Image (cartoon, rainbow, N blue to C red):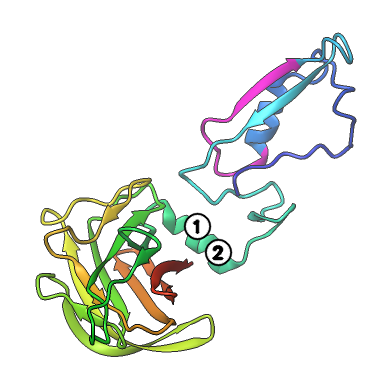
Amino acid sequence: MNGCFFWKKKKKIDAGYDPAEVKREWLEQVINSSIQRRIDGIRIKQIELHRSNPGKVIYVVSIPQSNHAPHMAEDHIFYKRYNYQSIPMEEYEVRDVANRSSSPDLSLQFFLEKDPISLEFEEGNEFSRPITLSASISNESVTPAQYYIVRLYIDKRLNVFSKNSDFAESLEQYLNLRNVTFHTNSYSKNYCVPGAMLVWQGVRFRIYDSQSPFQIAIQRNDNNYGLGWSIDSPGMQQKVGGAILNIVNGQAAIINIP
């Protein structure tokens, strides 16, 4: 829960409150006593209604994203936002949010150097000239990732050139995206400090550099190809995701699927 405060009695916003009766300090005490654990960094700004109601004020409460979520309301329930309402969290959601403060929360995205990119074909060749398939990793948690395993799943119908890559090819896998099953080859790599940089919050890192790219060659026909990924890291529940490589009229584009 990011922290919500609701007046029990509705009141027009331009009516305001008497600052002698409803003080900023009182409002802060109510918020802090109603939410456990306490949310740090809450700011309450008092705005005077000079034009609509002189002598009255309203309060704007700014609640930052918490590094210590989840937070329990005074009814001993953990809430989450869903559309325009607050609803109780499921037990597994409470555990998942609580773990984010002590473990990484990693995810991956595929991308092309140019999106869309035009494919080039040599005469008589069924497959295009190779293009680079790139991927980046990010972390939504304040806890940096020191150790993690990345697995990539690439549609078997694509010609993959990864001789310079330090990803190890392993077993074939079946990947389901949007109710379509794709037959893939899987590739994996272990990352650890000091060999790899920490993945910290708010920064995207490429999982391989320009000296060791994954390159793929694609058939001439319009088609959709499946790309998948999974990430394991200590303390983090395995994360998985995928993307569709969409080919239309000789152009390739990536559609990432959460």
Q: Which residues are magenta?
A: 34-47
Q: Which mark is residue 118?
A: none
For the residue pair 102 and 46, the one nearer the viewer reads as 46
Query: Residues under labels 1 and 2: Cα distance?
Result: 6 Å
Confirm whether residue 110 shows in the render.
no
For the residue pair 67 and 191, the one nearer the viewer reads as 191
Q: Position of residue 203 (x, y in %)?
A: 33, 46
| Quarter of the figure with residue 60 | top right
User: Mark 2: which amino acid?
Assistant: Glu
Mark 2 closeness class: few <14, some 14–19, many ≥20 residues within 10 Å: some
Q: Residue at x 62, y 34 (%)?
A: 32
For the residue pair 164 and 15, the one nearer the viewer reads as 164
* Tag 1 and tag 2, C-beta contact below 8 Å: yes
Q: For numbered disc 2, what is the local secondary structure?
A: helix
Residue position for label 2? 93
Decide: is 139 above or below 36.
below
Q: Position of residue 164 (x, y in %)?
A: 9, 70
Mark 1 closeness class: few <14, some 14–19, many ≥20 residues within 10 Å: some
User: Mark 1: which amino acid?
Assistant: Val
